[in-house]
Amino acid sequence: MGCHYVNGECENCQRDLPFPFTMAFQPIVDLETRSVFAHEALVRGVDGESAWSVLSQVTPEYLYAFDQACRVRAIEMASQLGMTSRLSINFLPNAVYEPRACIRATLETARRVGWPFEALIFEITENEHVVDRDHLRHIVEQYREMGFTVALDDFGTGHANLDLLTTLTPHHLKLDRVLITNIGQDTRRQKLVRHMCSMSEALGMGLVAEGVETLEDARWLYQQGIMRHQGYYYARPAFEALPGIDPACVSAVITA
């Protein structure tokens, strides 16, 4: 299903969703600066239900409208909560028909609440197979030209695999939790991530470790030069709120 434009507006993007949703936020910590680099906006039901409880209701006819609504809701709520870090928003590649047209509502919302474009990060999700690689490359290139940061989410598993980097040039790769869990003790995972460190440096891309749940794992990642972490060790997602970061957790990693 493509976009159908009437008077410059996409009809599919303007559909009213038949279900409500809201957002939770989880920080991405930068150990180099000992601060929050960004908060990722995570879809939730209005009573705190899981992301899947919402995503399972997104049928093809509402795909475009849902993608638009998520961006708008995330920016509005980040502004209302007084967020001062960057804001990271997941987007569905197959829900972007034409990058500059489909980003219009996002830009209008950012302007309305005074959210700087350069403080927006768009994460390419791995939840769906990318049908048209050239189209996805075009999206990434257009977003970069508009001043946004682009990240490839859940890298190393599912659809977000190494072959995407033959055509895409994201700013960051977010290493999937499957690679990170127990990495402080698992030599096989360690070897894989060390190679990813070398690869990302050669390609000029930053790394973010997802699913960091223990001090041991956080310390190992820090020792490899991976400075940006996200996971329960630092903070769980907070429902319609910005979770605090305990400075002691950060200090424990750095001073090991």
Image (cartoon, rainbow, N blue to C red):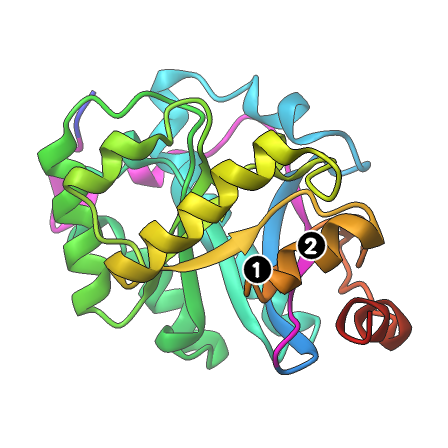
Q: Residues within 10 Å of mark 1 (few under 14, many from 20)?
A: few
Q: Could you say where residue 92 lies in the image, as x and y percent from the top left? A: 37, 36
Q: Do the residues labelled 1 and 2 touch (CB within 8 Å)?
A: yes
Q: Distance between the residues labelled 1 and 2?
A: 7 Å
Can residue 37 be spotted in the picture? yes
Residue hosting label 2: 220
Can residue 90 be spotted in the picture? no
Residue 7 highlighted magenta (yes or no) = yes
Q: Magenta residues?
A: 3-32
Q: Name the quarter where the C terminus is drawn.
A: bottom right
- Residue plotted at (79% across, 67% down): 253
Q: Is residue 124 left or right of residue 219?
A: left
Residue hosting label 1: 224
Q: Could you say where residue 215 lies in the image, as x and y percent from the top left? A: 83, 54
* Residue in front for this viewpoint, 22 or 121: 121
Q: Helix, strand or loop at disc 2?
A: helix
* Residue in front for this viewpoint, 198 or 73: 198
Residue type at numbered disc 2:
Trp
- Residue plotted at (45% across, 25% down): 127
**Rendered image quadrant of residue 187:** top right
Q: In this view, does 3 lie to the left or right of 83?
A: left
Q: Name the quarter where the N terminus is drawn.
A: top left
- Residue plotted at (74% across, 48% down): 217
